[in-house]
Amino acid sequence: LISAPIFLIGWIFILYFKSLLILNIARVFQGLAVGIIYTVLPMYLGEIASPKYRGAVTSLFYVFWWSGYLFEYILGPMLSYFNYTLASASISIIFLIAFIFQPESPYYYLMKNDVRNASKSLNWLLQSNEEEVDKELERMQKCVEEDQQRKVVWNELVATPTDRKALWILFLVGFLRQYCGIIPLSAYSTQTLKAAGDSFLISPDNCTIIMGIMMVIGSIGSVFTLDVFGRKSLLYFSCSLSGICMFSAGTFYLLKSHSSLEMAPYSWIPPVSFTILAGVSVVGIFPVNIAYASELFTSNTRGTASSVFSVYTTILGIVVLKFYLTLVDLFGEFVNFYIYTAVCILGVLLTWLIMPETKGKTFERIRHELER
C-alpha cells in the first residue's frame, strides 16, 4: 500500500513542476515505489497462492506490469502532457482504494503468532470449508515454526549450502531476465528499428506498440501455462526462441554494416524478431523469475531475498541500458544482439543443469529438494 502514495508524490511533481531537478526527484520517488513493489509483491503472491496455482497467480504480476507499458505506449501519442500524467496517476489512486481491503498474508500473521487473523485471512483466500482451512493452516504453522528456528540476518541468505544454492539460482534467472534482450529494446526499439532502414511491414513507432501488445499476450499465456508445463519447460522455450530472435537481428545488423549485401529487402527481420521476442520472453523468463523469488526461500528469509534480488536486478538493468548505446556507438547494433544471443544459449544450459522444477510443490518440498 505504501507504494501508491509514493507513486502519487512522483506524479504530482511531474504534473506541476517542469524543472529538471524536480523531475529527477520525481523519478527517485517512483523508482523507490517500483523497488517496494518488486520486493514485496513476489513474496505476497507466493504466500497467498496454493501450490497448485502459485505459478498462475505470480504470473499475474507481469500481466498487469506489461499492460501498464501498453497503457503508456498507447496513451502517450494521444494525450497532452498534463492529461497523460493525470491518467498515469489515476492508476495509483485506483490501486490504493482497491488494495486497502486486501488481507495480509497468512504467513505474515503466523510469523507474528497471530493465529486468529491468519485463519481469517486463509478463509478469505481459500473460500473453502472449515476443515480444509484448518488443514492448510496447520501445514503453514509447521512450515513457519521450522523456519523461525533460525534467526534472520543478512548473511543468513548464504549461511547454508541450500540458501546459497537458492540465491545463486535466483541471481541466474535475474541475469537472464535483464540480458535476454527485451529490457533494452523496451527503451530503444524505435531508434534501433530506424537504423534497420525502411520496412514494408510496420513503422518503428507501430512496432513498439505491437511489442507492448505481444508482451501482454505472452504474459497472459504464462498464467495458463506455467502450472501446466512447469518452470523448466517454459525456460527452455523462452530462452531458445529469444536466442533465435536475437541471433537473427544481430546477423541482419552485422551484414548491413559490414558487408556489401543489399539488406533493404530483409529490413523486416528486426521488427519481426523484436515482436516475437516480446511475446516469448515474457512467457517463460519473466514469470519464472517471480515464481522462484516467491518459492525458493523460507518464510523468514523470503523478504530479505526479495530485497537483495530487487537491488541486484536494478543494478543489472542500469548496466544493460547504460551500455546498450555505448556498444552501438563503438561497434554497431549487432554486438548487443550477439551478447543477448549468448546469454539465451547460457540460459538453456543453466535450465538443463541447475534450475529446479517447482510446479505444484509446497514450500517445504521445494526446500527439501534444494537440500539434495
Image (cartoon, grey):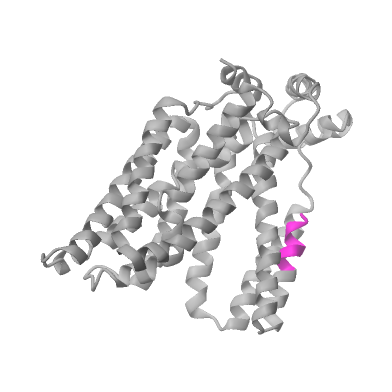
Please give left or right for residue 242 compared with residue 215 in the image.
left
Front residue (pair 162, 48): 162
For the record, the magenta segment spans: 1-8
Image quadrant of residue 262? bottom left
Q: Residue 37: x, y in percent?
A: 67, 52
For the N terminus, the quadrant is: bottom right
**Within the magenta stretch, is there residue 153?**
no
Please give left or right for residue 199 compared with residue 150 in the image.
left
Q: Residue 110: x, y in percent?
A: 82, 30
Task: Give the main secondary structure, helix, strand or loop, of the magenta stretch.
Answer: helix
Please give left or right for residue 11 compared with residue 190 in the image.
right
Residue drawn where x is 59% and y is 40% of the image? 57
For the C terminus, the quadrant is: top right
Residue drawn where x is 47% and y is 32% of the image? 231
**Within the magenta stretch, is there residue 3?**
yes
* Above or below, 103 relative to 189: above
**Residue at the left extreme of this rendering:** 261
* Above or below, 371 relative to 203: above
Front residue (pair 35, 346): 346
Mark count: 0
* Above or below, 115 relative to 289: above
* Above or below, 280 relative to 228: below
Image quadrant of residue 131? top right
Please give left or right for residue 168 compared with residue 234 in the image.
right
Q: Can residue 362 be seen by looking at this rendering?
A: no
Residue drawn where x is 57% and y is 27% of the image? 165
Image quadrant of residue 272? bottom left
Q: Can residue 309 be seen by looking at this rendering?
A: yes
Q: Residue 273: x, y in percent?
A: 30, 56
**Residue at the front extreme of this rendering:** 330
Q: Residue 249: x, y in percent?
A: 27, 56
